[in-house]
Image: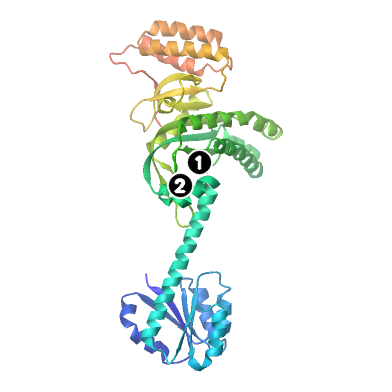
Amino acid sequence: MPTKVLIADDEPDLELLIRQRFHKQIRQKIYEFTFAQNGEEALEKLQEDTEIGVVMTDLNMPVMDGLTLLSRIGSLSRTIKVVIVSAYGDMQNIRTAMNRGAYDFLTKPIDFEDFEVTMQKTIQEVTLLEEAQRAHQRWAAVRQFFSPGLAEQLERNPALLEGRNQDVTILVSDLRGFSSLAERLGAQQTCRLVQDMMERLSNRIVEYDGLIVDYVGDGILAMWNAPVSQENHPLLACRAALAMLQEMPALAADWQNVVEGPLTLGIGVNTGVAQVGNTGSTRKFKYGPHGHTVNLASRVQDQSKRFGTPLLITGATRSHLPEDFPVCRLGMARLAGIANPVKLYELHSTPPAESWLAYRDAYESALAMFEARRFAEAQETLVSMLDTRRADGNVVPVKLLLERVSECLNQPRTTFDPALYWTAH
């Protein structure tokens, strides 16, 4: 792409001389010259072509002189460097121009070797200034995207933003029944509700050192352990998820008169290797994760609906949590687009009630019987659990497991698949 230079001078032969002098560079598209006969015409050309960054102008021109042009260029709000070209005897006006911001000057008659050297130096200066401005804009975007402390680390070590494979923990959230809720509330109330919810949930994520990657409609994508390493990142993500759920009752209470119903959140958490880096553009910075680990977190969030529980984590996340953390192993599921069955766990708030611990022990016992192909024993345990029910009334996991147990009893197969169910989409 050629560097664009504007020449403003009313001398009739100057354009021809410049085109002859630089004919090879023009043909090779190194330079592209634009010519104007006066300051007013030069200003119009600058307004038409925002890629012009260097102006070489005479001082004495009709309609609008070079000093006026110089002052008007300053209001264009972009990087333009001006070189004054005038007679040596006009040194007073040249000094005035330099005091008003001209970058350099040349005297007439023009020495074209000096002209080229000065032009190249001016082009280099514009390039450096534009690069510095773009860097400033990029880091301004970084400071908006990351917390102040993290942004400071990244400014000291920009290589952390480069694309790489990184072990991360991903959290995906979703507001249940949002589509019908939005249709009922209308645009204004929906936006206010989502903004309020995002503010509260985002605060909980940041409280546990999470990075908010994106807001998608009513959902949040958050990440831990990138761009900087974080010890115990699965634990941080799980604690953030539990804190997010604790925000929902207060949110529902504040919006009760508007929503006229419950506000329920679903969350999926997964840990694994993802491709992380800046995948945005020069217009918009976008740092985030990509790949299987992210897709699986989203799928797991979807499965929380099926299990009737607000928070599901994968076995990969569970393996990094303390042994006494309140989780219930729900079993394995085969999910669309995922090659191997996925271990799913329900994550419960702390401290758990005794009734929940009893439910978990009974359920995991029945699940172990099912996986050991002791279907009759598993069925007996699960039926007993349906009679007693758990404290929060959610028996969906029990029913799902009971369905699989009954299927195995009624339709015995040679090969046994311990997955509870399969998804086709």
Furthest residue in direction right, as rendered:
257
Residue 390 visible here: no
Residue 73 vs residue 11: left or right?
right
Which of the 4 image quadrants contains residue 30?
bottom left
Q: Is residue 276 visible?
A: yes
Q: Secondary structure at mark 2?
A: strand
- Mark 1–mark 2 CB contact (< 8 Å): yes
Compared to residue 149, the image places residue 399 above or below, namely above
Q: Nearer the viewer, residue 53 or 304?
A: 53
Three-letter code, disc 2: Tyr
Which of the 4 image quadrants contains residue 195?
top right
Q: Residue at x 58, y 17 (%)?
A: 392
Q: Is residue 344 above or below residue 133?
A: above
The colour scheme applied to this rendered structure is rainbow
Q: Which x, y percent locates residue 321?
A: 45, 25
- Quarter holding the C terminus? top left
In the rendered structure, the answer to whether residue 53 lies left or right of residue 246 reads left
Residue under pointer 1: 211
Q: Residue furthest bottom?
A: 89
Q: Nearer the viewer, residue 404 or 64?
A: 64
- Give the residue pinned by disc 2: 287
Does residue 121 appear left or right of residue 42 in this picture?
left
**Residue visible at 66% across and 44% down in the picture:** 188
Q: Is residue 126 above or below residue 191?
A: below
Tally of marks: 2
